Amino acid sequence: MENINVQNAINTSDTSTLIELLEDKTLPIEDVQKIYTAFKTDKQIVGQVAMNLSLRTSVYDRDKEYSQIMVDLLIDIASNPVDMGARWAVAKNPHTPVEVLRHLSNDSINLVRALVASNPSTPSDILEKFFNDEKIVRDGLSGNPNTPAKLLKILTADNDKMVRMRLAENRSAPKDIVTLLLNDTDPDVCKAANSNLEERA
């Protein structure tokens, strides 16, 4: 029944129904692709497709929802000029291919670069480059499992409590670096570092 709805809405250019359908993250990915292909010049639809892809993926379960269709859509949205804002959803998606993340790491919008910096699929050479970027971009490095240890060590002395907090919670950060945060000036950071080390014990 739902497939018929999608096809009908595409045939009749019923964008309000299509947007409503895209709000459902359980909509089959094949239908998401069909809608995107038919309306890739419609800013609202492109934005909603990006949102749908974002809702159906999880940074905690990176294999969830992985499919070639998902990857193809992410690649296409990354270079779609209709909705520049949709790039943020591509930048944060763990299924976004490395070459696309590499391209987005040079994006003019700092939020897009910040989301690439926090994406667990971003390789360490790109992350190193971000260390000299704006603060909003650097902030993403402290929680990323791929951030090189030498950068994490510098971040233990960052002035921003939230940077140190994300570092204290980073399960991939080397033990000796997390240990440095046990004596942090902020009790919340100390507590987070302690919990992180206890979970590894």
Image (cartoon, rainbow, N blue to C red):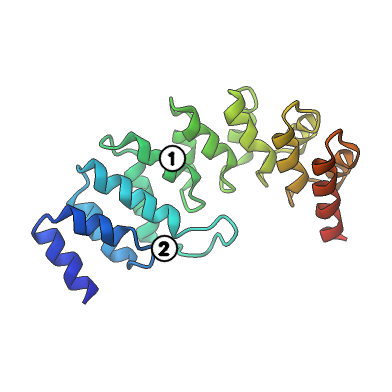
The numbered mark, 1 or 2, whose residue comes first in the sequence reads: 2
For the view shown, which residue lies furthest in the front direction? 187
Disc 1, SS: helix
To which quarter of the image does residue 186 belong? top right
To which quarter of the image does residue 79 belong? top left
Quarter occupied by the C terminus: bottom right
For the view shown, which residue lies furthest in the left direction? 12
Expressed as whole percent of the image width and height from the top left, the position of residue 180 reads: 88, 38
Expressed as whole percent of the image width and height from the top left, the position of residue 4 reads: 17, 72
Q: Residue at x 56, y 55 (%)?
A: 59
Q: Residue at x 83, y 44 (%)?
A: 178
Quick one: label 2, few (<14), some, or many (20+) residues within 10 Å?
few
Give how far apart the Cα atoms at labels 1 and 2 are.
Answer: 20 Å
To which quarter of the image does residue 90 belong? top left
Q: Are marks 1 and 2 in contact (CB under 8 Å)?
A: no
Q: Which residue is mark 2?
A: 67
Disc 2, SS: loop
Looking at the picture, which amino acid does disc 1 mark? Answer: Trp
Q: Which residue is mark 1?
A: 88
